[in-house]
Amino acid sequence: MALILDGKKIAGEVRRAVAEEALTLKDGRGITPGLAVILVGDNPASQIYVRGKESACAKAGFLSRAFSLSAAATESELLAIIGGLNRDPAIHGILVQLPLPRHLRPDILIEAIDPAKDVDGLHPFNTGRLFTGNPYHTACTPSGVIELLDRYGIDMAGKDAVIVGRSNLVGKPLALMLLARNATVTMCHTKTHNLSAVTVRADILVAAAGSPGMVTGAMVKEGAVVIDVGMNRRDDGSVVGDVAFSEVARKASYITPVPGGVGPMTIAMLLRNTLNAAQRIAG
């Protein structure tokens, strides 16, 4: 039976370390890390995420600002808010909560954020730095995955790593991070032929497709490390991942649960990125 990669526990350790460093920064330099989150519309999941980020900031001793706009908000309104936050010395991190209403273009809004304050790691400057092997801010969820693997002493060098899902948020940046750790990376997607033939050879398998229970036991190699990034809400309100947990756990050596696996790590890494941004300003 697989050992559980406890994201909740590790995220707590990261957050405590961040809070201690934030206090040191405040006492020594008079700088309090500041994070601003922009939420557009009334997506229930997004509202929960934003509240979680506000709570995490408060516990870490950060300044937190939330901007909630109606689903009818225009790009001009958002660009004006982002421009003001770019100029605000009290704000070190800016995050536009995704997904956005269809009439808004995420790329336009993300590119408007000062790259030094792009703590989500999605600005072309930051993705380009990651591509060249010299990262500045890195995407939070992939960073959380790498942190979990490191904390449990799982070596990535020389391993066959398979990622199911090629999103800009998770799949693509995680592929680059795993490559930087000398893994051999294969990325799968909706056009991949015979998916199970690819996943079954993975030493490290990451499911990030947004499809409940799509990774079954038959698709997993004996002893594989399985990372479930999926977060799918059922009609009854329960949350499940992309991995059929009970059957995959019987074959894997390590596995992340949903909830309590990668999810808590995302917010922890967001806090770390924001702290890093404030520390850079402090010199």
Image (cartoon, helix red, strand yellow):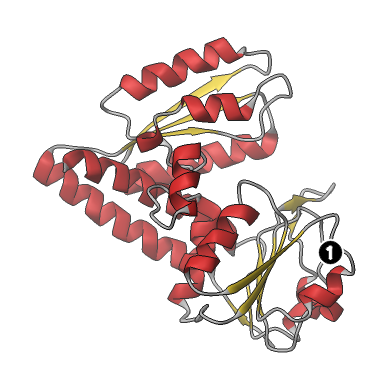
Nearest the viewer among 102 and 167 is: 167
Apparent side of residue 124 relative to residue 276 in the rendered image (left or right):
right
Graded by Cα atoms within 10 Å as few (under 14), some (14 to 19) or many (20 or more), the crowding at tag 1 reads some
Secondary structure of the residue carrying numbered label 1 = loop
**Number of dots carrying numbers:** 1
Relative height, residue 160 to residue 259 (above, below): below
Residue 184 coordinates in the image, percent (x, y): 61, 74
Q: Residue visible at 40% across and 35% down?
A: 115
Task: Find residue 12 and report its image quarter.
Answer: bottom left
Identify the image quadrant of the N terminus: bottom right
Q: Residue at 23% of width from left, 54% of height from top?
A: 21
The answer to whether residue 62 shows anywhere in this view is yes
Question: Image quarter for residue 83?
Answer: top left
Q: Is residue 25 above or below residue 12?
A: above
| Residue 38 visible in this rendered orientation of the protein | no
Closer-to-camera residue (97/240): 97
Find residue 233 and report its horizontal and vertical position in percent: 77, 49
Q: Is residue 169 above or below residue 261?
A: above
Amino acid found under the numbered disc labelled 1: Met
Residue in the picture at 82% in, 79% down: 217
Q: In the rendered image of this protein, does residue 238 appear above or below residue 185?
A: above
Is 38 situated left or right of 102 in this image? left
Query: Which quarter of the rendered picture does the C terminus lie within?
Result: top left
Residue farthest along the left direction in this orientation: 28
List x then y, in percent, for residue 267.
Answer: 48, 50
State the residue in front, 37 or 142. Answer: 142
Q: x, y (%) of residue 79?
A: 50, 16
Pointer 1: what residue?
214
Quarter of the figure with residue 226: bottom right
Give the farthest residue toward the right. 194
Q: Residue furthest front?
A: 132
